[in-house]
Image: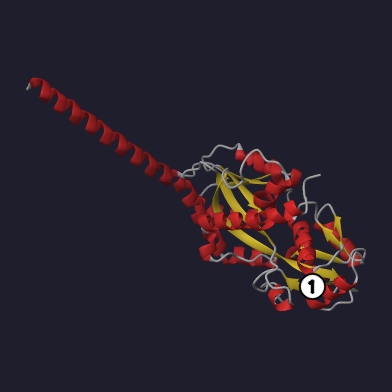
Amino acid sequence: MVAAANRSMVRRQFLSLAASAVALLAVSQIARAQIYPTRPITIIVPFAAGGPADTVARIVSERMRTTLGQPMIIENVSGATGSVGVSRAVRAPADGYTLIAGTLTTHVLIGALYTLQYDLLDVFKPVALLADGPLLMTARQTMPANDLRGLIAWLQANPDKASQGITGVGAIEHVAAVLLQKQTGTRFQIVPYRGNAPAMQDLVAGRIDMMLADAATSLPYVSGGQIKAYAVMAKTRLAAAPNIPTVDEAGLPGFYASLWYGLWAPAHAPADVISKLNAAAVGALADPSVRKRLAELGQDIPTLAQQTPEALGAVQKAEIEKWWPVMKAANIRAE
């Protein structure tokens, strides 16, 4: 009887201790959720300061700082098409204090361009899709064609005579140019540049014939009548240039390509931290001044349904499935 009573007492003590441990863990998690963040948050931008990715990250993070109550420090870690910054973020502690503001390039294209030692879908947790910058199909002002159908017909009638500037090997402009040739049965020279600015200078000067360019780079020259814009490579027209038709309207339906921007944390960041960061990003994208500044850069603001971590993960996966086969078929690899 005494032994049975002792066993019962021990069991009750064990259950009590176990319940206390669970309760302490729950309290700890609640406390962490309530106090995060307690210090500055670093956002790695895997490109140089002043570029589109840097600009988008700074616009959004300025507003996120207000919600989170802590400074948001931008750290530019450029090199190797953004893969240097990505590798830095992969090695960062998963505590929510180091994030990466990535793009289609860093979270999709480099996976086919380089032999990485990690899986881009596994090493990060999505936080939010921040902006989507569809490319514009543009040409020199003296190009004979006045619309997209005419351009394609001209290219088909003049194989290997035209040249298209791109911002570098493996960039979205390069991959989309390869897909354009495949889908339209055209052939033209693809000319790599060290960025959009020098390529656009040559397009304005008529030294190259075409570019698939981001809106921020191309719209000032379109508005000034220095180059032609045939179509927006998206489902909807740009708010900043509502007179430019979409590819669906212009005669090349479904030929979409954009340079989108997102925010990620290292893979093992706590779920409550991801939730808090997402809420701050969503709040930033709802701010009228943020929306205005992004629209002026030719960026589309994701809908509220597209701003969830799950939506960014789905976009990343879908883009991998779309662009990797194009790159591998064309043998696009880092030089």
> In the rendered image, which quarter is residue 287 located in?
bottom right
User: How are the residues colored?
Assistant: secondary structure
Q: Residues within 10 Å of mark 1 (few under 14, many from 20)?
A: many
Looking at numbered disc 1 in the image, what kind of residue is underneath it?
A: Ala
- Please say whether residue 50 is visible from this viewpoint: no
Q: Residue at x 53, y 39 (%)?
A: 94
**Which one is nearer the viewer's eye here, 179 or 123?**
179
Q: Residue at x 54, y 52 (%)?
A: 127
Helix, strand or loop under label 1: strand
Using the rendered image of the protein, determine whether residue 42 is visible from the camera's viewpoint: yes
Q: Residue furthest left?
A: 1
Image point 50% across, 43% down: which residue?
269
Q: Position of residue 107 (x, y in %)?
A: 64, 50
Q: Is residue 10 above or below residue 71?
A: above
Of residue 206 and residue 39, the one placed in the foreground of this image is 206
Split into 4 quadrants, where in the image is the C terminus? top right
Across and down, in percent, residue 245 comes to: 72, 77
Vertical placement of 277 versus 204: above or below?
Answer: above
* Image x and y of residue 268, in percent: 51, 41
Q: List the residue tagged with mark 1.
A: 229
Tell me the residue at 66%/40% (across/down). 87
Q: Is residue 23 left or right of residue 243?
A: left
- Looking at the picture, tell me which residue is in the foreground, 234 or 322: 322
Give above or below for 22 relative to 127: above
Q: Position of residue 6 (x, y in %)?
A: 13, 23
Specify whether 306 is left or right of 234: left
